[in-house]
Amino acid sequence: MNTSNSRIVGPAGRSLYGMVALAFLNTLFVSTIASAEGRAIACFVLPKDDSQAQAAAVMSSILRGELAKLSGVEVRTGAPSGNPEAATEAEKLAEQGFEALNTGDKTTALTRFERASDLLAQNPGAGSIMLHAKVAKGLGVASFLNGNTSKATELMKRSLLLYPDQKPVEYAYSVDVKNVYDFARRDILERAPGNIEVRSTPDSAEVFLDGNFKGYTPITLPNVPAGSHLVEVARDGYLRWGTTAIVPEGGRVATEAQLTSSPSKSDFDRAIADVSRSWNQQRFGKASEALMAATAAREILMVKASLGQTGFEVSGFVRDLSGSVKPVQAVIVRDANFYKSVQEFLTSALGAVPVAGSGNVSLGGPPKALADTVMKESAEVGGDVVIDPEKQIFGDLGDGKGDESITDTWWFWTIVGVGTAALAGAITAVVLTSGAEDDTGGAVGNLNIRLDKVGQ
């Protein structure tokens, strides 16, 4: 009699063990992909019926905007952004640029930041707003150190408009550089704002100003701080479009986006129609494959939406990395917790968490020892000072014969007493207007929707 614990496993047992092992390895593989590459999630909102087309378009913009705030998530839509590798390369060049600044190699720094700026400009939608602000800051500092004060001032203003949470110490490469930063910060607040008019062909496209969703074309954006701004336009089925808009003080600038059909537009349109016809849990998984391929997504969230008396009703499906499909639904009430409710819906549906606040994240700066020295020297001369950005005061000062020293001019040492000021943040009133806010950051009020020809 065999009293050992050993067992003889037959073909059926080996097959079962093999299936379990394969399932485990597949789960591990999927988890590894998600961890290493991030989660590329496509997000689409369809109207529950023809009368809800406008509500669906608005909810699509809201869901995508909040989805982008989830940790490790890359949002995929029917409006392809520029080459994502361009953002990676721009980030690398920016790091090299700051390394060059910190070693005093201003020429290399300028070259690296210029290349990074060109990459982002040529690939609309590539890279985060923080990356855009980082490159603008680095290019501004490098431009100043290479003698171009006017360009440096505008670039530092652009960086501040993109990412207001920057500190003077982060510009303490020299007292002169910090002074330009101080002037740029004050100039943003003192100049009269202007307007940006944004049109597109076709129209009814999403408009983003400095990374913040503002509404749909055609639209006029009021009270935009004077200076350089990033304007992007996106519509499913077309390549994302972007430009730099220079807003004159108290004036208006017009931009016209001629949208180009994406190479996969026909496949995308067909895939959307197929999924809409396959609106049940059993058929959604297979039907969504073509849509995921057209958007380079590995997961997909797709819902139908309608706007009722209390808020948005959404219901649909999520297909995850393993290919599993689950139904999702929610009623998102239009109250003070609106955006919090949207986040809760997304986190529940996708199992992701919001990114922690980035207010204290530095875009890069000088070594601490240098920064401490510069800040001390700046304080000794009275802190913030006025400079004239239109004069090449820190460039070639001549041979010294008959030239007046810049330190002898009255305006150079005039103390202006600039305090810490908060710059304008994202405006969400495009959707929720005429209301108060609570500590959740959500707005309370009426929903005003103006969107035509959504189905064009």
Image (cartoon, rainbow, N blue to C red):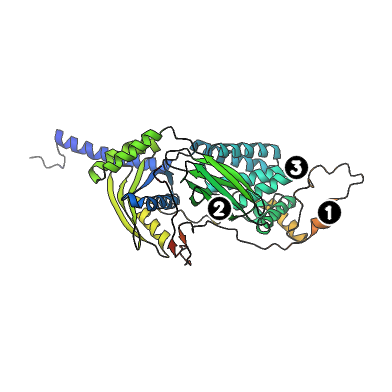
Q: Callout 3: 10 Å neighbours few (<14), some, many (20+)?
A: some
Q: CA distance from mark 3 to mark 2?
A: 34 Å
Which mark is nearer the camera, 2 or 1? Answer: 2
Q: Which residue type does callout 1 highlight? A: Thr
Pointer 1 residue: 407
Q: Toward which corner of the image does residue 27 lie, by quadrant?
A: top left
Report the residue at 49% width, 59% height from top: 429
**Label 2 secondary element:** strand
Report the residue at 48% width, 56% height from top: 430
Q: CA distance from mark 1 to mark 3?
A: 18 Å
Vertical placement of 434 versus 59: above or below? below
Mark 2 in CB contact with mark 1 (< 8 angstroms): no
Question: Looking at the rendering, in which quadrant would you find the N terminus?
Answer: top left
Question: Looking at the rendering, in which quadrant would you find the C terminus?
Answer: top left
Pointer 2 residue: 221
In the displayed image of the protein, which residue is found farthest to the left?
1
Q: Nearer the viewer, residue 87 or 54?
A: 54
Q: Callout 2: 10 Å neighbours few (<14), some, many (20+)?
A: some
Q: Which residue type does callout 2 highlight? A: Leu
Report the residue at 18% width, 35% height from top: 15
Which mark is nearer the camera, 3 or 2? Answer: 2
Residue 407 vs residue 290: left or right?
Answer: right
Residue 226 in percent (x, y) is at 64, 52
**Label 1 secondary element:** helix
Residue 203 visible in the displayed image: yes
Dot placed on the residue nearer the N-terminal end, 3 or 2: 3
**Label 3 secondary element:** loop
Q: Which residue type does callout 3 highlight? A: Gly
Residue 7 vs residue 110: left or right?
Answer: left
Pointer 3 residue: 147
Report the residue at 23% width, 43% height from top: 282
